[in-house]
């Protein structure tokens, strides 16, 4: 606790961490929009990836409210508290038991890249999604936020900023090749 004035005066006692928590609680943070190649079914109902082919994942709407940083300040009882919140990582649950953790928003796929692995956040399915509900894997992207705060009194700290989750569905098939000899 920091007291703006000596005890016994009319100045309120300011708890900088409580002020920081209040600032964090008021910050608008939203789940990310999932970007994937192959495209999620809600974006393209005919989309289908292939077993063994690279899958690219990225945050399609990376910005202050979905990835950070967000920074806000408030002054209470003569103490100014500043909070900076940002995503620490995104955990992709691929629906096949695999989980991939990425510390960047990822790189969007472009058709000119052809069939190659994502340089930042990718996966390869080993089985089709045929046996899954709706014949598609449910993919979730969970962003874990961190928040740092500092006060004009010189104290600082960290807050648990929580997690937000988005989901999408992706269909994975297989290509059969017949050799004629």
Image: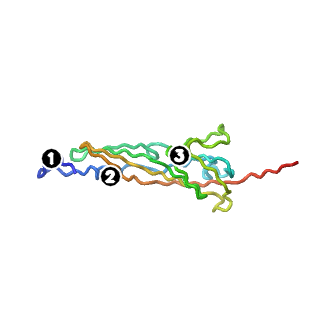
How far apart are the two marked residues, 1 and 3, measured between alpha carbons? 47 Å
Q: Give the mark nearer the N terminus: 1 vs 3.
A: 1
Q: Is residue 135 left or right of residue 143?
A: right
**Residue at image mark 1:** 5
How many other residues sit within 10 Å of disc 1, few (<14), some (14-19) or many (≥20)? few
How many other residues sit within 10 Å of disc 3, few (<14), some (14-19) or many (≥20)? many
How far apart are the two marked residues, 1 and 2, measured between alpha carbons? 23 Å
Q: Position of residue 16 (x, y in %)?
A: 27, 49
Secondary structure at badge 2 equals helix
**Residue at image mark 2:** 21
The residue sitting at 61% across, 41% down in the picture is 109
Q: Position of residue 19 (x, y in %)?
A: 28, 50
CB within 8 Å, label 1 to label 2: no
* Vertical relation: 139 (above or below) 107: below
Q: Give the mark nearer the N terminus: 2 vs 3.
A: 2
Q: Position of residue 2 (x, y in %)?
A: 21, 49
**Residue at image mark 3:** 59
Secondary structure at badge 1 equals loop
Secondary structure at badge 3 equals strand
Which colour scheme appears in the figure? rainbow
Give the residue at the far right of this rendering. 181
Q: Give the mark nearer the N terminus: 1 vs 2.
A: 1
CB within 8 Å, label 2 to label 3: no
Q: Position of residue 165 (x, y in %)?
A: 49, 54
How far apart are the two marked residues, 2 and 3, measured between alpha carbons? 27 Å
How many other residues sit within 10 Å of disc 2, few (<14), some (14-19) or many (≥20)? some
Give the residue at the far left of this rendering. 8
CB within 8 Å, label 1 to label 3: no
Numbered-mark total: 3
Marking on residue 56: none
């Amino acid at each position: 606790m920091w007291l703006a004035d000596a005890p016994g005066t009319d100045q309120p006692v300011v708890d900088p961490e409580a002020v920081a928590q209040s600032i964090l609680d008021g910050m608008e943070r939203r789940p990310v929009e999932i970007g994937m190649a192959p495209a999620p079914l809600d974006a393209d109902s005919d989309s289908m990836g292939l077993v063994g082919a690279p899958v690219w994942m990225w945050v399609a709407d990376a910005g202050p409210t979905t990835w950070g940083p967000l920074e806000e300040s408030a002054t209470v009882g003569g103490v100014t508290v500043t909070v900076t919140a940002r995503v620490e990582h995104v955990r992709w649950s691929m629906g096949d038991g695999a989980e991939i953790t990425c510390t960047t928003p990822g790189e969007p796929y472009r058709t000119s890249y052809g069939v190659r692995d994502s340089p930042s956040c990718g996966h390869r399915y080993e089985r089709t999604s045929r046996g899954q509900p709706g014949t598609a894997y449910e993919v979730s992207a969970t962003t874990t936020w961190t928040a740092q705060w500092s006060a004009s009194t010189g104290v600082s700290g960290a807050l648990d900023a929580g997690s937000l989750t988005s989901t999408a569905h992706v269909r994975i098939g297989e290509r059969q090749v017949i050799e004629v000899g």
